[in-house]
Image (spheres, coloured by chain):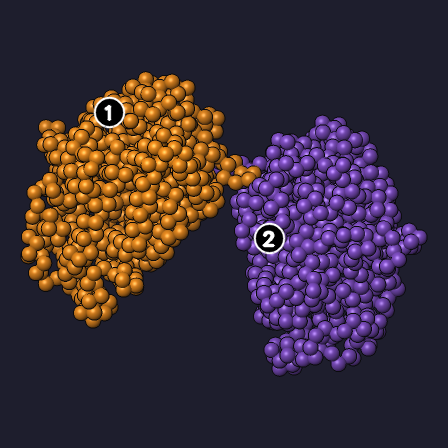
Chain colours: A purple, B orange
Amino acid sequence: MSVLLLLSSFAGADEGMWLPEQLPGMGPQLQEMGLEIPPEQLADPQAEPLSAIVSLGFCSASFLSGDGLVATNHHCVSGFLSYASDAEHTYARDGFLAGERSAEISAGPAARLYVVESITDVTEQINGKLKKRTKDVKRYQIVDKSKKLLISQCEAQANHRCEVASYYGGQQYRLISKLEIQDVRMVYAPPESVGSYGGEIDNWMWPRHSGDFSLLRAYVAPDGSSAPFSADNVPYQPATHLKVDPTGADPGEFVMIAGYPGSTYRYRTARQMRFAEEVSYPYSIALSEEIIALLKAEAATGDEASGRLNSSIDQVANGLKYRQGNLDNFAGSDVVGRKQAQWAELEAWIAADPKRTKLYGPVLAEMDEMQAESEASFEADTTIGYLRWLSDNLGVAHRAYRFSVEAAKPDLERDRGYQERDLERTQQRFDAMDGTYWEPADKQLTELTLKRLMALPPEKLPVGMAEHVAAAGGVDALLEQLFAEGTIPDAATRKAWLEMDRAELESMDNPWMQLAVLLESKTLAPQRAKDKALAGASLRLQPLYMEALLQSGDQVYPDANGTLRISVGHIKGYSPADAIEYQPQTTVAGMVAKVGEYPFDAPARLVDAAASSTQSRFADPDLGDVPVNFLSTLDSTGGNSGSATLNSKGEFVGFLFDGNYEAMSADWLFDPELTRSIHVDVRYMLWVLEVEGADHLLDELGLSEK
Amino acid sequence: MSVLLLLSSFAGADEGMWLPEQLPGMGPQLQEMGLEIPPEQLADPQAEPLSAIVSLGFCSASFLSGDGLVATNHHCVSGFLSYASDAEHTYARDGFLAGERSAEISAGPAARLYVVESITDVTEQINGKLKKRTKDVKRYQIVDKSKKLLISQCEAQANHRCEVASYYGGQQYRLISKLEIQDVRMVYAPPESVGSYGGEIDNWMWPRHSGDFSLLRAYVAPDGSSAPFSADNVPYQPATHLKVDPTGADPGEFVMIAGYPGSTYRYRTARQMRFAEEVSYPYSIALSEEIIALLKAEAATGDEASGRLNSSIDQVANGLKYRQGNLDNFAGSDVVGRKQAQWAELEAWIAADPKRTKLYGPVLAEMDEMQAESEASFEADTTIGYLRWLSDNLGVAHRAYRFSVEAAKPDLERDRGYQERDLERTQQRFDAMDGTYWEPADKQLTELTLKRLMALPPEKLPVGMAEHVAAAGGVDALLEQLFAEGTIPDAATRKAWLEMDRAELESMDNPWMQLAVLLESKTLAPQRAKDKALAGASLRLQPLYMEALLQSGDQVYPDANGTLRISVGHIKGYSPADAIEYQPQTTVAGMVAKVGEYPFDAPARLVDAAASSTQSRFADPDLGDVPVNFLSTLDSTGGNSGSATLNSKGEFVGFLFDGNYEAMSADWLFDPELTRSIHVDVRYMLWVLEVEGADHLLDELGLSEK
């Protein structure tokens, strides 16, 4: 049974991150909700509006002009701004405006724009090779190799990145082919005091007054092919671009987003949710609090430090608030209880029929065992993960070493991220590191996570770590040795490491490499082998589990997996608590009313201009002012940041940039009463551009004054 | 010109704390607003509803039954509950319910209920004795003596208290005669976790879920005359009582309150407002923060301590939040700017006409000088005030000494509060002290304020204080001497002090009395003499100032002065900030949603009952639940606490108990968009009484189940 056909239960509700191909089947309901273009048009990645929707890899974006002008969030480009900053310029803080094309600056060698060209159903090419009795490890290998083969064939096209995405836990696969644009430049970014007005205090909050938008431009070689940054490159000419509707969208109006939601857990088990509530979220929260305290203290030492660290602080703070918000939501609206009730329903549905009991009963039991296993190693896995992420030094050494290990295998058998196709991108990331590395922070973060790791009970420690630390003379002595030679190796050395073979790296007299080799060979590699068996088991179990879930319930869209999705809904407020109604729009006057100390330090030029915002051509007649942010019922999650918000005609009316506080637990369970997405109103961007004197950009958007 | 006739500009707006006699002149507008009873009825203190409105002296209240059942706020009886508590019972925390009449306990010898019997215009009897050229001190004395004479004649009736109230700064006077009921008993008080649910966190806040109500009963001698507490006393039979409307009132509905607002500053000068903003509020806030920290630490030491101190903590915290809220409001909505604009208008109006310039110009100039003088001595005055208030020991000594000083004069020439009529009440307050004094707190508070006082620059110190402290060997040595003999003198000694003559007290070898004599004779008495001259000047200037204000503007009600007033308005929410709408009603479900740690620790029996509150006979059909609190546009201030909220027919629908945060600065300037009063919905009281099993009280209210 293909779950993609199970659309009869869709009744125009707001829950759902739909595959474009699902929309034609929802036609009547979409029209009833207010969609004015044919639903079939939304299923075609080559047609407007989807052909104008792009990805930065970690955020969503869209083309707004025929000259490759790209709209996304301010918080999506903070890494680019950090990269571009130097001792004289702190663009992440002060903003950036290129007065003309030639002043547009590179977003760095790691910046990418992906333009989807095709989405192909490849389920049969993958699952057709599996037999019912295929063993788990073999099952994983078959699926993995099939996917890599499809990718490698697809990537035979120059400058294309391809991926095989899995839906419903492996019940369905799609091959997605994307043009990879490598020369991305900054066009406009507001100052931090506009782009993240309200900062951490307002993050996830409503009412909101954030100008969380920015403009980039895609560049290609003069012949139109994708190429790395070069002064000779020219603006990319996309097939289509979105039309900006300068009248925006009003409360009650139909809106949709097209973007790349990262991941949701809507089909996780009740046990997994409880583990998040009781163990994993609290553990990460405690660790994140220490990390943030440390990073903030370090960022306070000066402009260069804060320029390099602010992006990490934002990232960790966002994760922290996300987990804390989930816990608050879990406690506040009994999300866990509702999930458990759903679970009990599923169990009852299975138990009600002997055939179902025979088919699905063992699936649930085995999934439970798998979860128990992952819970047992959670603390060590997580702490090693933080260590590798937070220590740039260990990160470089470990990545180089893994490349050398994988290099011994045929390309298609290598682990994802360590194939030939990944080498150049890794090299570019290594290059970009000089612009973001900050030794004092790296040192303290390494110490923090390493000590946390060593504080685990002996039986949970990574294999050989106790001996390694003892041989160095204790954790402090080891840390001293690690940082004795100072900073991260220079760009040339990093490049050389990536090209060395395994034996060379293993015999290297570098304490970072030695630590990387130990962790990889004794702990991470064996763990991955185990994970592959589990993944194989999951490929066997998940489709059955999803089948049971979908037969017993009524949800019909797959969990988010970083692929292109469309959500549909309306502009609408909500009631967060007894006697409080949140209206769905905020105004420039409301932004000015919040002006005060950081993070509410809106620039004087904006505050001055606000005195006449009611007279602006971008003011809303009903509000009597320029709208700043709005709320919608659209289903979204991390990765959707930067998603174009479209009206019923598919025209651009805003930027999705956040969910409300109550929406955090929506990753587990969507609540139509409380779950909202937060958007920048396009009229706020237009007003800010006018205040900033960016007339050439308003021209390019077709919105010059006369 | 009598300003009371200036009613033409009243257009049904919500601003105004009206004298009952003003209402008949507002008839058409009141009817348009929704009033259904004749406005004339509201002007008659002998007719319903006013005849059922009473005062506790510091709070408002009303009769709800023919057997003297009185409704007021929970926070108005916290002193009574503290008095009644002992080692076994902490009624302020746990609440109190008398299962039958005989179990109703005394609220203490100082508790009073005042029932207004008549209000008489005595302007001519007072101002008729003044000539234009009467000197200021003389003017003060004539007015003072006239008032005292009227009071003394009025109080010839047994068990009556009379007052002469001044309106518009002495332009008008009314003689108010009140029956004084001296036996007041507790009938029902909810536990603190209901009566001040949300505590300091929610104080002044909306949305609110407070059961801030309580029930008292008035008792009199068997012959119907007022008498102190006696087991033989019987319930008082009021002339009328309010009818409870168990269907409450709904959003948009007309409501009014009748009660005793304490004081407002609507006609203060812009300079006075600026001084509050820049100097006096910040000074008191800083001091209050220290006092609260100290009291809280002390209250945390045990149940008895907290029982005795909680009432003071609430009082100081409330004042602190009030001043802080004023400052926030001043900053947030430019109250000071608007006041200054009004002031500029007044000055322009005066300057526009030579006659006005000649008449009113000097008035404004002289008022400015008077204000400058009071600003100069502000810090010393305030700190001595706090010292006398916070130190029960000094308070007793000082009051006794002042009685002895005043005793030398004929009764009518004595200062207010120190006449024959005040002796018994003072004695009762002295008696009640044993139930509320808490030495460790008194000691620390005395130290705190005394040291603050001594930290003032030498030229601002009270006369002789430096020498007094030096003679004792420094502040610490003085404090040691003050507390060497331990606690406050016993009740018999306190009584004896009140009866001693001046010479006896002045020669007494008691360090508290010596301090009291020094402060009184060298600083307070001379200051009072100066104040009387200023008061005389004020009696000359204020009526002219008010005349100018009222001619140039359109406000027509006098500032609150603790006398009976009626405010009219509607049940209505408001928008506190961009995109936030506050609805005007909260529900039991909303109360339960807040349940957590103190101060949100609603009792389990209430939370359990809340599971079926939607089915209660007191549930609102539109809300689908029992309403808890509601917002109105009614103009109110401190002293209005406990005011009966009446519907268009004059029936009881709730208890006013607070203003919203944005309403604090309304004491200076009323803002129709933001100023709201907060009420307990009568249906919440009825539901709580039912949950508590107080069927006999529901019976008495005519609301038994069948």
Residue B665 against residue B482 in the figure, above or below:
above
Question: Up-down: is A464 above or below A156?
Answer: below
Where residue B367 sits in the image (x, y, percent)?
Answer: 31, 43
Chain ID of residue with mark 2: A
Q: Residue B454: horizontal and vertical position, in percent? A: 27, 63
Q: Name which residue lies at 84% across and 46% down.
A: A67
Q: Is residue B376 visible?
A: yes
Amino acid, disc 2 = Gly
- Residue of label 2: A199
> Cα distance, mark 1 to mark 2?
57 Å
Can you give x and y, in whole percent of width and height, for residue A433 in the image?
74, 66
Residue A123, horizontal then vertical, whole percent: 84, 45
Q: Is residue A161 above or below residue B134?
A: below
**Labels 1, 2: one chain:** no
Please tell me how many numbered marks the rendered image carries.
2
> Of the residues shown, which amino acid type is indicated by label 1?
Pro
Q: Which residue bears the numbered disc 1?
A: B45
The C terminus of chain A appears in which quarter of the rendering? top right
Q: Residue at x 46, y 36 (%)?
A: B674
Image quadrant assignment for residue A256: top right
